[in-house]
Amino acid sequence: MQISQNPTRHFYRPVIGFLALASGALLFYAIWLCLHNISLMSTKGTQFVGLANFTRLATDWRGLQALGRTALFVLLATSIEVILGIAIAMFLDQDFPGKKIVRAVILVPMIMTPVIAGLTWRFLFNAQSGMINYWLSLVGLAPIDWLGNPQIALYAVLIADIWQWTPFVVLLAMATLETIPKDLVEAARMDGASEIRVIWHIILPMLRRTLGVAALIRAIDSVKAFDLFYIMTKGGPALSTETQNLYGYTVAFTNFDISYAMTIALFLTIVTNIALLVLNRFAMPKGIR
């Protein structure tokens, strides 16, 4: 009697098939919505319009600006969180008093829900009674309208996102640093290698896979960011923090233009997948692509 080399495949194949079928059905329905004109404010009913919604999106200046803000936010959030997370993880890998307590405390922001994190930072950034401006006043600096200044508001939300999700990168990096042989690092130092050379030639190459995974996950989550923006700014002031997700939400639940909102969401999904494929091509080791 022949025994299957991988008996578990009989269990996960139906699950994969179901997920593929469900995803395909949802994608088909999304495309169908994009090719029609469905608005809850119209009495004309369902009308086939072909690629008219995509043509509209290509000339929608507000939507293109929202896409640009989304790209800027994703780029800054992902790069800063990965770099800062690696630096903090390398610091926490050292031996010092209270190391376990610091490790536990630094992971607290990641446990908080985005709504709670958004409300917390909204209070901290309050122009009149926020703690951030109070701390600035202690060193003689003038108060800043963090969430009311169109040139600053996006970066205020970025600070909140970095605070909440950098610990995720720290967690991944610390797990990888624990697997690096200490003898290898000590041998390099004994041979006269500087700390920078040890980090650049030994530690970072071993962290490359972790860096790639962390960058991919954080990029995906940053694209989907909605809670922080909605709680802290609702897209304001003057649409300076309106991302593609917020714009699609406004189109769907304020203008009730369902087809165009789905077009925005589908377009963002396509652009995100292309960007992630490029990131996966250049940032991930060949063994896990």
Image (tube, helix red, strand yellow):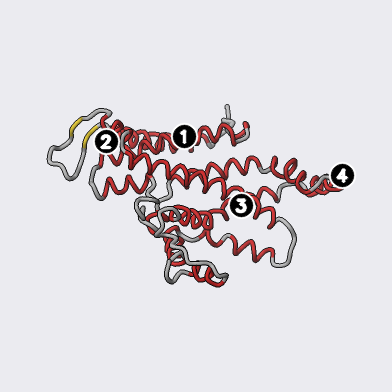
Q: Which residue is mark 1?
A: 13
Task: Read off the residue under disc 3.
Answer: 85
> Between disc 4 and disc 1, whose residue precedes?
1
Sequence order check, earlier mark of 1 and 3: 1
Residue 245 versus residue 143 in the image, above or below: above
Select label 4 or label 1 by which is in front. 4
| Callout 4 amino acid | Asp
Residue on which the image places disc 2? 33
Label 4, label 1: how far apart the Cα atoms are: 52 Å
Helix, strand or loop at disc 4?
loop
Q: Position of residue 109 (x, y in %)?
A: 53, 60
Mark toward the viewer: 2 or 4? 4
Query: Dots 4 and 3: beta carbons under 8 Å?
Result: no
* Amino acid marked by disc 2: Leu
The crowd level at tag 3 (other Cα within 10 Å; few <14, some 14-19, many 20+) is: many
Earlier along the polypeptide chain: callout 3 or callout 2?
Answer: 2
Q: Are marks 1 and 2 in contact (CB under 8 Å)?
A: no
Q: Residue at x 33, y 33 (%)?
A: 58
Q: Residue at x 12, y 41 (%)?
A: 43
Of pointers 2 and 4, the one earlier in the residue sequence:
2
> Which residue is label 4 attached to?
191
Mark 3 → mark 2, Cα distance in angstroms: 41 Å
Disc 1 marks a residue whose amino acid type is: Arg
